[in-house]
Image: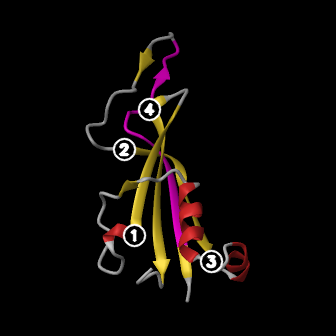
Amino acid sequence: MVYTIEVTRRVMSYRTRAGVTPTGGRYGGTWMDGDSRLIEPPLEACETYDEYDAEDWNGDVIAWAVDRIDRTGAAGLSLFPVGDAVPEHSWLSGRYEDPYEGDSKGTETSVGLIGAWWPQ
């Protein structure tokens, strides 16, 4: 059986781009009323359970998955539809705000289980 964890990270902002004019005035940085802008291209990674993981985790694929998902920081149930192919409980999401830029720059993470996870 194939057990895969898909992790997607997007660096987003829900504010317009902020800047300084040539005369020193400030502009932008206002809320986008539910819209967002992508600051960096999405980063997608997949981790697949293999024979080395089986050896390290004594064949416990669930313990392996919990450890891998815990490292992502995603802990909330996803609010986005994931389609008919994947059970809704198989997706988690998380958000981390940049400590220096606050809500002007945040990393959104989503984690999904891909492959033959059922009934695990």
Q: Position of residue 50 (x, y in %)?
A: 67, 81
Along the horizontal axis of the image, is 4 left or right of 108? right
Q: Quadrant of residue 15?
A: top left
Where residue 17 is drawn, which disc sits there? 4
Near-viewer residue (47 or 1) = 1
Q: How many angstroms separate mark 3 from mark 2 (CA)?
A: 34 Å
Q: Position of residue 97 (x, y in %)?
A: 48, 36
Q: Which kind of residue does numbered mark 2 sit on?
A: Ser
Q: How many angstroms separate mark 2 from mark 4 (CA)?
A: 11 Å
Local secondary structure at mark 2: loop
Between label 2 and label 4, give the one nearer the viewer.
2
Along the horizontal axis of the image, is 1 left or right of 81? right
Q: How many angstroms separate mark 1 from mark 2 (CA)?
A: 25 Å
Residue 84 falls within the magenta-colored stretch: no
Q: Quadrant of residue 85?
A: bottom left
Magenta region, mostly helix, strand or loop? strand
Q: Which residues fall within the magenta stretch?
A: 5-22
Tell me: residue 111, above or below residue 105.
below
Earlier-in-chain disc, 2 versus 4:
4
Residue 18 falls within the magenta-colored stretch: yes
Q: Which residue is mark 3?
A: 49
Q: Which residue is mark 1?
A: 90
Q: Which residue is mark 2?
A: 36
Q: Which kind of residue does numbered mark 3 sit on?
A: Tyr
Q: Which kind of residue does numbered mark 4 sit on?
A: Arg
Earlier-in-chain disc, 1 versus 3:
3
Earlier-in-chain disc, 4 versus 3:
4
Which residue is depicted at the point 32% across and 69% down?
A: 88
Earlier-in-chain disc, 1 versus 2:
2
